[in-house]
Structures are given as C-alpha cells and as structure tokens.
Image (tube, helix red, strand yellow):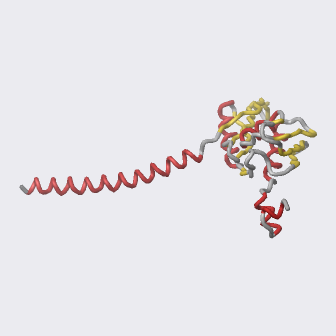
Amino acid sequence: MAQEQQERRGGGSGGEQRRGSGGKGGGKGGKGKKEEKEITYQERVIQIRRVSKVVKGGKKLSFRAIVVIGNEKGEVGVGVGKASDVIGAVRKGVADGKKHLITIPLTKSNTIPHPIVGGGGGANVMMRPAAPGTGVIAGGAVRTVLELAGVKNILAKQLGSGNPLNNARAAVNALKTLRSFNQVAEDRGVTVADLFA
C-alpha cells in the first residue's frame, strides 16, 4: 500500500511537472513561431570575386561575396563576406547584411514617398517614386536592393561608378534618408492633410 501511495504521489507530481513544462514549452514554441515569421529574409548574391592578399610567403587567395538581404516588406541590408571558400564568404555576407538592416517607409502603391539621391564611394543613385503598374525601372545592384526592400514601382538611375558594391551601398544610403509623410508632418508641427493643402 505504501509503495502504491508513493507511486501515485510520484505520478501526480510528475504529471504536474509535465503540465508545467508543457505550458512553458508551449510559450516558448509560440515565441519561436513569431521569431520564424519575423525572420523570413531572402538573400541574393550580386557578386563573387576571387581576391588575393600579399603575405610573407606569397599570395593568399580568398573569395569576396556581396550579398543583399531583405524581407520584401521594407527591410533591406547589404553585406560583404570574405573567406577561403565561396560558401563561407556567402554565409559571412548574409550575417553582415543582417547586422546592417534598415527599415524604409513605403506608400500604399509600394513606392518611395519622395525623390531622393544617395551616394556610396564613387557611385550615386537617383530614385523617384512611380505610379502603380510601372514596375522597378533600375539596373544592376540597385534593382536587387529595391526588389528585396519590397519596392514595386520606382524609377532609379545609377550615376558615376558601375561598381556593384558602391551602387548597392548608395541605394541603401538613399533609402535610409527617406522620410514618411507622418515624420515630415510631425517635424513641421502640422497634420498630414495640411501637407497637401
């Protein structure tokens, strides 16, 4: 009898522990699902180059990957990774891109709120908002950045250098300086309706 009572007690406490841990696990599972939903980034490699570094024993060869990462909902970043193999370079580039993510304001027609010019190195990028149905009128690295940022209608032009890294950084620089109508109205101390009056 004593053994049966102990087993029942042990079973009861075990059941309680299971319920408790199940509840906590469920909570963690819920958080995990939210994190998975938030972290659904697409990544595109825009350039892979074999680079060399002169060291004491000769030349050390490695690979440099330029990666653009974005969620197509207003977040985008450009990362650069170097490693002795291509896969390692791309992995480092993705990690670097996640560190440099920016959020941009998009209008209802999935375009930018106002014209903007951005610079990076010797490259300059000019961007203008476009009407619905226009599509992404841009080329090279700028097009990749805009598509992964979630911009559907825009006119963009690369000015100056044709270097993909500088152009990608110039595009991110331009997008970073964008301001929404709400931000402009708040800075001026008026309502959004007054901006268009």
Give the residue furthest to the front: 197
From the viewer's perspective, is residue 98 above or below residue 24? above
Estimate the x, y position of residue 70 in percent, counting from the top left: 69, 42
Whether residue 54 is visible: no
Instruction: Answer with left or right where residue 177 lies relative to residue 44.
Output: right
User: Which residue is nearer to you in this view: 135 or 195?
Assistant: 195
User: Which residue is nearer to you in this view: 57 or 21?
Assistant: 21
Q: Which residue: 72% across, 45% down?
A: 77
User: Which residue is nearer to you in this view: 16 or 47?
Assistant: 16
Q: Which residue: 64% across, 41% down?
A: 41
Q: Count the marks.
A: 0
Whether residue 144 is visible: yes
Which picture quadrant has residue 196?
bottom right
Q: Which residue: 82% across, 44% down?
A: 171
Which picture quadrant has residue 166?
top right
Estimate the x, y position of residue 9 in percent, counting from the top left: 18, 57
Estimate the x, y position of residue 104 in percent, counting from the top left: 74, 51
Give the residue furthest to the right: 160
Give the residue furthest to the bottom: 189
Q: Which residue: 74% across, 35% down?
A: 65
Give the residue furthest to the left: 1
Instruction: Answer with left or right where residue 85 lies relative to residue 26.
Output: right
Q: Which image quarter holds the N terminus?
A: bottom left
Which picture quadrant has residue 136?
top right
Instruction: Answer with left or right where residue 171 lies relative to residue 33.
Output: right
Q: Which image quarter holds the C terminus?
A: bottom right
Estimate the x, y position of residue 80 in percent, counting from the top left: 74, 40
